[in-house]
Amino acid sequence: MRYIPHTTGDVTEMLERIGVASLGDLFVEVPESVRLKRPLDLPEEASETELLRELKALGVKNATAETHKSFLGGGAYHHFIPTVIDLLISRSEFYTAYTPYQPEISQGTLQAVFEFQTLICQLTGMDAANASMYDGASACAEAVLMAMRLTRRKRVLLSKALNPRYRAVVATYCRYLKMELIDVAVADDGRTDLEDLAAKLDDATAAVVAGYPNYFGVIEDVAALSEKAHEVGAKLITAVAEPVALGLLKSPGELGADIVAGDGQSFGLPLAFGGPYVGFFAVRQKDVRGMPGRLVGETTDLEGQRGFVLTLATREQHIRREKATSNICSNQGLCALMATIFMSLLGKQGLREMAEQNLAKAAYARQQLSAVKGFSLVFDGPAFNEFVVRSEAPVAEVLARLEGEGILAGIPLGEDYPELADCFLVCVTEQNQRAEIDALVAALQGGAA
Amino acid sequence: MTIVGTSGLVLNEKLLFEHSDPGRKGYSLPKLDVPAARLADDLCRKEISGFPELSEVDVVRHFTRLSTWNYGVDSGFYPLGSCTMKYNPKVNEVAARIPGLASVHPATPSHLAQGSLELMYRLQGALAEISGFAKVTLQPAAGAQGEFAGMLVIRAWHEARGSKRSKVLIPATAHGTNPATASLTGYDVVPIASDGVLTLEEVEAHMNDDVAALMVTNPNTLGLFETNIEAICKLVHERGGMVYCDGANLNALMGIARPGDMGIDVMHFNLHKTFSTPHGGGGPGSGPVGVTEELIPYLPGPGVELDGENYRIESTKADSVGRMMAFHGNVGVMVRAYAYIRSMGPSGLKHASEMAVLNANYVRARLEGVYDLPYKSRSLHEVIFSDKDLEGDCHTLDVAKRLIDYGYHPPTIYFPLVVKGAIMIEPTETESQEVLDEFCDAMIAIAGEARDNPDLLHQAPVRSRVRRLDETTAARKPKLKWEKGA
Amino acid sequence: MEFPEELKYTEEHEWVMVEEELAVIGISDFAQDALGDVVFVELPEVGTVLEAGKAFGVVESVKAVSDIYAPISGTVEEINEDLIEAPEIINTSPYEDGWMIKIRMDDASEADKLMDAEAYQALIAEES
């Protein structure tokens, strides 16, 4: 096996040095009764050629934005990925290292994480960000737990317009912590219903959680949400599943959010059927010591040179064990590096330009679609790059017909929102050319005719 | 002896923000081919204050320079105990980037995502076979999230029986993630003693009808096989509990013994350890969870199932503990692990475990007598020494730092907590006898230096890009981001 | 290492100085030495009611964290604000400038149950 360097001679020599007769003798502590007495029932090993042939054959069974015109979003987005990213993260000093426990030989990772933390703070308008979480949904769940610790309260209000997968993960994390999760209704404009929120908020509420933009692509009134939450001493958590929007929108920090949790997949990460993506997590200065996850801080070495170290580690599981702020250990380091490189390349102008393109493409698509007979737009609140379309014909039929024409038109909403069973969620990014949007419109028109 | 570490030309590099020059661009976007749109002004920010403006060259050079300040498995020997820093095969990287696998959207209808679903289904099956469990979920993103999923499953099983058990037994040798996970699942932690291996008596003394589960690691963090595991599992079951196994150290056992056959009910895998996927400077990992038949209904979901000839995402199950991640987990990591299992085959995996154990025992044989070996029973994949015999007021930290000067990544240090000044060495199977010999020579030389010239250890490292860093000031006055003019 | 005779000590390595109904509380020289450079201290708010034996605060070094337990029941009268900005005072002056809180004792006789300097030194000799 090419990954294992031992020759038969090496093995003999090493066994001799150890003082045992055979490899079997190394396993004397493993009781006979639990030994596996047969070979593993797995396919025989594949050569490099065979392996790649097999995997490429699997690859062509998938539909992608290369094979189809895709309008799928809903928490994972098809965006421009600069070539530079993959080539830089393929430097194996980055990807074959682990957590930077030894700062003297991990300054590359540490400085990059420090830059990631800074970029996330600038993007979200918050004071401190951690080194990454698993994804946006788990970051959102950790934010809920942090709000519970900060307020010592157990009641959490989740906007129904928050990504339903995020809501599901929050529920999983809270499952046995004696917490109360309450839905807040969606208003006609597709934003969180402020009246329903006001009615449900009380002084036992730990947090209000809303998407920004929300699952329907609508831009929430974060200032109003935070004002309402703060009136009763609750924390406002904003979940950002589409951070490209923050190239244009006011930052959640500026609007009063206490914790910003989100997903950085849009920042240069391939869709990869759902992961690995990268969760980000940002808080106010006063709450830093209550954060989950790793933090990198700046310091100096013995000779006064600037350097970076993991810091405030007493919050973490390896030191505080059952009292830790989270059980997270491995995070999504390499994905955070990808997002860091993306943000460096796009920079101040590029992210804005990209956000404006998304806004324009989606606005164009919305306008064109709204004129198609048999289809209508559901929400009239300000939108970014996604929107909900209602169909007179059954959604499953419409989507299946468009698939036949090489179009993935959107995500059906019925499973997560029975009241929107006649609706689907359409996402348009800078990657969708006008011709693709026109093709979508034409295909929908074709069905209605 | 060859000293691997030397000094070369290392380039300084500022922070991104310090390079920034207004007006520079590092991107190219397609021309906008639709009319521009506007949002109401009160929704929009003026700019992202502080965001950098750099050219593509600036960015490429920046990160290339940063990379040279790192040490990875491809740089050299990385014997970080309990982390299984084995070689990360390059073909796996190519595999994960195959366009159809890398760019499929997670909400693609199942019938149009058959390639990824089939790969996941096969990987689930392979992991179940390797571990001896009835079913595996791939959803958890990392070991700690796998632990959480597994403990949720155990709790759901108890609750379904009306059992209100509130405690979890955790040996002193456990990873910190174990007690942190138990807390997250709403359990109180009862630490139990473990001096070497867990004894039946110790478990028996604590295993009452308020204990929901025992969390073990096998082989444990001392590199020892839990020899009483069968009897312990039997006892825990008799008293109405479940046994969770932290699978971080599975690299010792592939094709040798299966946790599912030992009586363990739930175990997480670390694909980034045992199954060779890169550690990425901290992640991403992947932490699949295997369970016995009885626990299948409670698994997090949805998983992947085969219906006739078609693979599909399962519909949500009533008893499932729910969703761990927004989508299907770290699928890109799964592709790499699958590629590894296919490249190794059944005999290759067993050979890997055998060579991993051989390497650990070889290092042990070479260093025993030079460094204190607190536990004498046969080591599996890793060996734990202590700094007890070190002279010259030198400690484990000093040995670790001096190893850097010799060109090695230090082992895991000061863990497990039951060994004072622990030095935890896990060589993995991908290191040759020559590499191990050079490393052991360095360890022996360092013990000599501690005796003859301890200052070399106290001052170390001197060859790295930076010297020892002031962690105290970093924690007292945390500076967690760059600020203009600061 | 110093263990002033006029103080009382606990098994959790706190010290207590009784001044009529008030008790000043801190951590011992042994405790600060074992922790290493203290980087952070979390103290209760004035007015908090403490129960003997229960944790009232936290002291942290770079790689260790330790709860601080109330040796005696009472109500917090004053906290040492200087420690928030300069926790290193606990290392340099554990018994004087490094005091943590002053409490009004519920029952001053509780202090009699604590160890004197000699008993405490015997305890740490056993522990180390």
Image (spheres, rainbow, N blue to C red):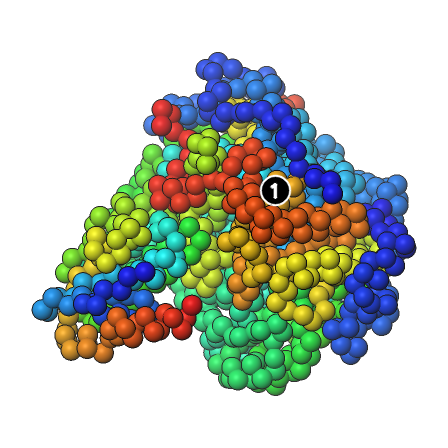
Label 1 neighbour load within 10 Å: few <14, some 14-19, many 20+: many
Badge 1 amino acid: Ile
The reply to whether residue B394 is in sight is yes
Image quarter hosting the C terminus of chain B = top left
Residue positioned 58% across, 24% down in the render? B11
Closer to us: A347 or B225: B225
Asked if A299 appears above or below C120 in the picture, the reply is above
Residue positioned 20% across, 55% down in the render? C96
Q: Is residue A322 left or right of residue B271?
A: left
Residue positioned 18% across, 67% down in the render? C6
Q: Seen from this angle, which residue lies furthest left?
A: C20
Asked if A146 appears above or below A109 in the picture, the reply is below
The reply to whether residue B78 is in sight is no
The image shows a total of numbered marks equal to: 1
Closer to us: C13 or B301: C13
Q: Seen from this angle, which residue lies furthest front?
A: B452
Residue A424 position, x and y percent, is 57, 43
Residue B382 position, x and y percent, is 68, 60
Residue positioned 31% across, 45% down in the render? A286
Asked if B132 appears above or below C109 in the picture, the reply is above
Residue A434 position, x and y percent, is 62, 23
Image quarter hosting the N terminus of chain B = top right
Q: Is residue A393 left or right of residue A252?
A: right
Residue A133 position, x and y percent, is 52, 47
- Residue at the disc numbered 1: B404
